[in-house]
Image (spheres, coloured by chain):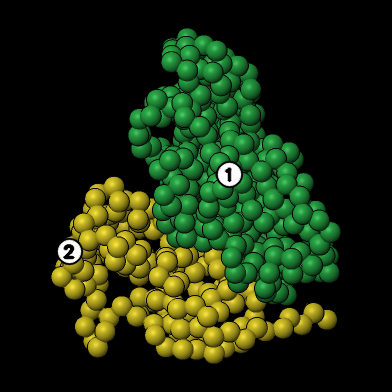
Chain colours: A green, B yellow
């Protein structure tokens, strides 16, 4: 399959890429890992006249820790995050990176591209919404940081202006006594999940002091289940509070029926994934090392 | 009158051989390999980033060549199935797939062997789970996975001695 013809522009730096977008107009798109965009172009769902390729910009792929935050260059590939030592101390990042699609796609796809694409079925947004995440953006006029909570506004839609790009993603490293987990249910590796659940829980003894729960693939944007978090906060994590959180998740999500399942099926699935993710997050909050992987049908 | 699109000059190494070419931006890497360079061992299966029949190594990392533009391979080194055998001798991975009957129709095999290449060059004793993860992006529709697992285990052993 051939995409519609387009003009190719290779950016040498991120400011140059932003300037190119500005000059080329609305019909220009950025090319990062291309693992969402290129299939969309081949199917002619996306038909940009110009592509600005970021892959040759040096210094856009890095993972470093500064002042209690992990910073990811926008073009850091999922596989680089999967294989980085940061995943040992910050396991929810490993859960996400190692679970995206398959080896080949993880070798190409980027964290910045995934967030900027804002695909309702994407993995990173759901995971990073459970964390304190800032998106550093660059346009010819300004540089700004946007909290991830304000960044995605609708399906495939962010606050990015047409000549603005993601430069860096900064995620605060959670302290002691807190743990996170991300689980997705997939019919096979290369497909998008049917539903996914990201959970971050802070424990004090047996009591949950704080909780963040976000569901992926069950709404036009990742669903922040605040009522479910309320059902856990200041309570013991036991069958009763977890059941209340699961009920709140079923209420909060708004899934579309499609070939992956009915809306009711996905609601049930999202609640079940939350239950499992809570179990893992609590064990990690207690300092246990728990390996998880996505669940395949 | 359709707009003219400028071709882009690129240089890339495929299986050790240097090529200088001018490509249309929308040309996919797999089309360049198959149509321009006549390296038809890399297959097109689903053409939608699913099946992995088009897997090649790009600077040592496996990628789906149907989901990358040829212009993006400028300056890169590509390894395709044609680059595995040396001097008429099968590569240890190819030998393992043959010896283990790790193929039936063979359509997915070039992609599977390159996914195997990425796995076994780093890991000479992959676990069952590591093998499953390594080839999760390669679909075999003859359902021959059991022998493919055997082949990959044997390939890892062969590579240890290599």
Please provide percent x and percent y for residue A205. Answer: 43, 15
- Label 2 Cα neighbours within 10 Å, binned few <14 / some 14-19 / many ≥20: some
**Residue at the image point whose x is 35% and y is 34% from the top:** A289
Label 2 sits on residue: B157
As drawn, A32 above or below B94: above
Please provide percent x and percent y for residue B9. Answer: 62, 86
Left or right of A194 in this view: B91 = left
Q: Splitting the image into 4 quarters, where does residue A287 fall?
A: top left
**Residue at the image point whose x is 58% and y is 33% from the top:** A130
Give the quarter of the figure containing the N terminus of chain A.
bottom right
Q: Which of A162 and A172 is in front in this view?
A: A172
As drawn, A278 above or below B151: above
Label 1 sits on residue: A67
**Residue at the image point whose x is 73% and y is 38% from the top:** A150
Q: Which of A218 and A243 is in front in this view?
A: A243
Kindly tell me whether residue A138 is visible in this rendering. yes
Q: Which chain does the numbered disc 1 sit on?
A: A
Report how many numbered discs are placed on residues in the image.
2
Secondary-structure class at tag 2 = helix
Q: Splitting the image into 4 quarters, where does residue A132 fall?
A: top right
Q: Nearer the viewer, residue B159 or B150?
A: B159
- Label 1 Cα neighbours within 10 Å, binned few <14 / some 14-19 / many ≥20: few
Left or right of B15 in this view: A111 = right
Left or right of A15 in this view: A289 = left
> Which dot, 2 or 1, sits closer to the camera?
1
Give the quarter of the figure containing the C terminus of chain A.
top left
As drawn, B73 above or below A153: below
Kindly tell me whether residue A162 is visible in this rendering. no
Q: How far apart are marks 2 and 1 (CA)?
A: 45 Å
Please provide percent x and percent y for residue B58. Answer: 45, 71
**Residue at the image point whose x is 55% and y is 12% from the top:** A234
């Amino acid at each position: 399959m051939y995409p519609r013809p387009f003009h190719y522009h290779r950016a040498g730096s991120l400011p140059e890429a932003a300037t190119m977008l500005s000059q080329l107009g609305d019909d220009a798109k950025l090319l990062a890992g291309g693992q969402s965009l290129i299939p969309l172009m081949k199917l002619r769902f996306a038909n940009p006249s110009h592509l600005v390729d970021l892959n040759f910009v040096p210094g856009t792929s890095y993972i470093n820790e500064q002042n209690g935050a992990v910073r990811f260059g926008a073009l850091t590939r999922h596989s680089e995050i999967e294989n980085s030592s940061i995943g040992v101390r910050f396991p929810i990042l490993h859960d996400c990176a190692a679970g995206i699609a398959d080896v080949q796609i993880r070798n190409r796809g980027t964290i910045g591209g995934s967030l900027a694409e804002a695909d309702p079925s994407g993995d990173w947004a759901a995971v990073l919404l459970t964390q304190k995440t800032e998106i550093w953006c660059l346009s010819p006029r300004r540089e700004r940081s946007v909290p991830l909570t304000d960044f995605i506004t609708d399906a495939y839609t962010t606050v990015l202006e047409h000549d603005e790009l993601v430069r860096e993603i900064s995620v605060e490293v959670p302290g002691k006594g807190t743990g996170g987990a991300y689980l997705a249910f997939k019919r096979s590796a290369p497909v998008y999940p049917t539903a996914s659940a990201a959970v971050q829980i802070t424990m004090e003894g047996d009591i949950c002091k704080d909780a963040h729960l976000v569901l992926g693939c069950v709404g036009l944007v990742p669903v922040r289940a605040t009522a479910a978090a309320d059902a856990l906060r200041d309570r013991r994590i036991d069958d009763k509070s977890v059941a209340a959180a699961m009920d709140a998740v079923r209420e909060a999500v708004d899934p579309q029926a499609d070939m992956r399942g009915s809306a009711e099926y996905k609601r049930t699935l999202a609640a079940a994934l939350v239950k499992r993710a809570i179990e893992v997050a609590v064990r990690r909050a207690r300092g246990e090392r728990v390996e998880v992987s996505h669940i395949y049908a | 009158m359709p707009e003219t699109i400028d071709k882009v000059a690129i240089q890339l190494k495929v299986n050790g051989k240097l090529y200088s070419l001018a490509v249309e931006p929308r040309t996919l890497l797999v089309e360049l390999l198959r149509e321009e360079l006549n390296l038809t061992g890399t297959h097109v299966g689903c053409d939608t980033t699913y099946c992995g029949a088009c897997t090649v190594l790009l600077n040592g990392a496996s990628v789906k060549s149907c989901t990358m533009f040829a212009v993006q391979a400028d300056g890169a080194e590509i390894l395709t199935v044609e680059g595995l055998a040396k001097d008429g001798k099968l590569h240890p991975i190819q030998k393992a797939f043959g010896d283990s009957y790790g193929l039936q129709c063979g359509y997915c095999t070039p992609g599977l062997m390159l996914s195997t290449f990425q796995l076994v060059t780093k890991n000479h004793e992959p676990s069952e789970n590591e093998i499953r993860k390594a080839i999760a992006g390669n679909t075999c529709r003859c359902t021959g996975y059991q022998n493919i697992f055997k082949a990959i285990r044997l390939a890892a052993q062969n590579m240890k001695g290599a």
